[in-house]
Amino acid sequence: MVIVASSILSADFSKLGEEIKAIEHAGADWIHIDVMDGHFVPNITIGPVLVKSIRKITSLFFDCHLMIEKPEDYVEQFAKAGADLITIHAESSLNVKSTIKKIKDVGCKVGISINPETPIDLIKDVIEEVDLVLVMSVHPGFSGQSFIKDVIPKIKKAKELINKTKRKVYLQVDGGINKENAGIIKENGADVLVAASFIFKSDNYKDAIKQLKES
């Protein structure tokens, strides 16, 4: 069954600990942590200090998505804070392969992400080296955006490239995912769905997560 990575970007930060416990009990598989620096994307969100704090209250898999400039400078901090997987953007780092190695060296799994307008061929040479490929289905920076349907062929192509590897590589999609589009996203190869607003703006977290898994 598909993995649901619940993005805390849309959680109520005045009671973040309670929110994390709630989505854990509701059936979320991973916690997706959107890290933004106000440079790579026009917003500022979470840093290693907060990751370290919430690491104390859950054993769920921490999927840290670094939407930042020079992610290589912060890899060690997020690893020490409790990240299980660190995803970098192909568009952000000057030396993607070096950063991938650095993430592996600190004991984390590694993901590579591309924005909606970025061709999948940009990451073709590193798919063998990563544990996860993230296809953004919105422009990164803010929650609550609508799913960009034009990325569906890119999701399918990413899956075809992954299938040629000799390793287990997850295909994650992030942005505007809900019960209406989860089915077609999964049909085209995604096995990890990131959801923020659809879960946290719902009246029932458990039902929302179940709808994503069963769509």
Image (cartoon, rainbow, N blue to C red):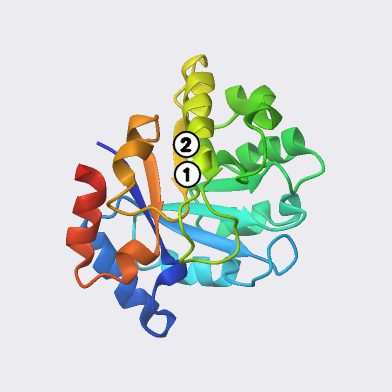
Residue at image location 47% in from the left, 25% down from the top: 159
Q: Residues within 10 Å of mark 1 (few under 14, many from 20)?
A: few
Query: What amino acid is found at the position of numbered circle 2 in the picture?
Result: Ile
As drawn, is 104 to the left or to the right of 211?
Answer: right
Q: Secondary structure at mark 2?
A: helix
Are the residues at dot 2 and dot 1 in contact (C-beta closer than 8 Å)? Answer: yes
Name the spot of residue 113 as percent of width and height, x first. Answer: 60, 42
Residue 200 - label: none
Lateral position of residue 212 relative to residue 103, left or right? left
* Position in image of residue 165 (x %, y %): 52, 16
Q: CA distance from mark 2 to mark 1?
A: 6 Å
Badge 1 is on which residue? Answer: 149
Q: Where does the N terminus fall, quadrant-wise?
A: top left
Residue in view at x 80 percent, y 39 percent: 95
- Of residues 159 and 53, the one nearer the viewer is 159
Q: Which mark is residue 152?
A: 2
In x, y percent, where is residue 86? 57, 48
Q: Name the residue type under label 1.
A: Lys
- Nearest the viewer among 157 and 128 is 157
